[in-house]
């Protein structure tokens, strides 16, 4: 019995470690990320409602196609909080570049390449939730379909009519 208990404990530890390493996220985190995507961060303005880089307003900067991202959750979270230097991707952390929290650089070091500050402010929890949502709902999902759009925005969403 003692050997069985040790094997069980070893298995539980191995599974827990694998889950943490794989970045498994709770449904609560995903829902928080979805809510942030839909109502707080205005991500769709540049990245499109379906994360495909097809923005709603053609005057908005064209954001990256998040369906093709190669970034990890940690990297996505950093981009959300710190923006992308030299691009229109804004920093959602109001303290971005006030110290070395963003890519190890300050505003003095990054100079003219500093991204704009977003009008909305997000916390690390928001950024982590958004990253989890992006990886779960968009990454490697292929082109958006009407079914995927309706799952995200609701069955009656007018925006979904453009998708097959």
Image (cartoon, rainbow, N blue to C red):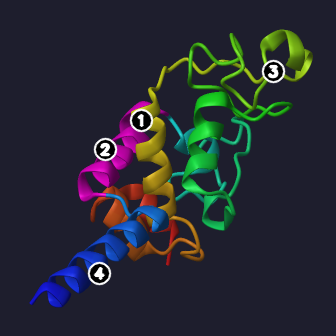
Q: Which residue is mark 4?
A: 11
State how far apart marks 3 and 1 are (Cα): 21 Å
**Which of the two residues, 159 or 27, is positioned nearer the viewer here?**
27
10 w.r.t. 123: above or below: below
- View extreme (front): residue: 2
Q: Residue at x 73, y 45 (%)?
A: 62
Q: Residue at x 69, y 63 (%)?
A: 70
Q: Quadrant of residue 57?
A: top right
Sequence-wise, the earlier of marks 1 and 4 is 4
Residue 118 drawn above or below residue 86 = above
Query: Which residue is label 2 attached to?
Result: 32
Relative image position of residue 136 (x, y in whole percent): 44, 64
Give the residue number, with chain letter if any, for mark 1: 126
**Dot 2, crowdedness within 10 Å: few (<14), some or many (≥20)?**
many
Q: CA distance from mark 4 to mark 2?
A: 31 Å
Q: Which label's residue is closer to the chain start, 1 or 2?
A: 2
Q: Main secondary structure of the magenta part?
A: helix
First reached walking from the N terminus: tag 2 or tag 3: 2
Q: Residue at x 39, y 43 (%)?
A: 38
| Closest to the observer, 21 or 41 | 21
Residue 114, labelled with which disc? 3
Q: Nearer the viewer, residue 138 or 79?
A: 79
Q: Residue at x 55, y 17 (%)?
A: 119
Alpha carbon of mark 1 to alpha carbon of mark 2: how far? 7 Å
Cα separation, mark 1 vs mark 4, equals: 33 Å
Q: Is residue 146 left or right of residue 98?
A: left
Instruction: Provide the residue span drawn in magenta.
Output: 26-41
Q: Are marks 1 and 2 in contact (CB under 8 Å)?
A: yes
């Amino acid at each position: 019995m003692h050997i069985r208990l040790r094997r069980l404990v070893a298995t539980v530890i191995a599974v827990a470690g694998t889950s943490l390493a794989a970045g498994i996220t709770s449904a609560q985190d995903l829902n928080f990320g979805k809510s942030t995507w839909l109502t707080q961060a205005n991500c769709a303005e540049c990245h499109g409602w379906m994360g495909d880089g097809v923005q709603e307003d053609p005057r908005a900067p064209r954001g990256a196609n998040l369906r093709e991202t190669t970034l990890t959750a940690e990297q996505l979270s950093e981009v959300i909080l710190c923006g992308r230097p030299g691009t229109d991707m804004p920093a959602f952390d109001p303290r971005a570049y006030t110290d070395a929290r963003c890519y190890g650089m300050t505003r003095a070091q990054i100079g003219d390449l500093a991204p704009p500050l977003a009008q909305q402010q997000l916390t690390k929890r928001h950024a982590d939730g958004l990253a989890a949502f992006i990886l779960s709902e968009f990454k490697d999902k292929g082109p958006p379909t009407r079914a995927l759009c309706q799952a995200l925005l609701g069955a009656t969403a007018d925006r979904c009519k453009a998708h097959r």
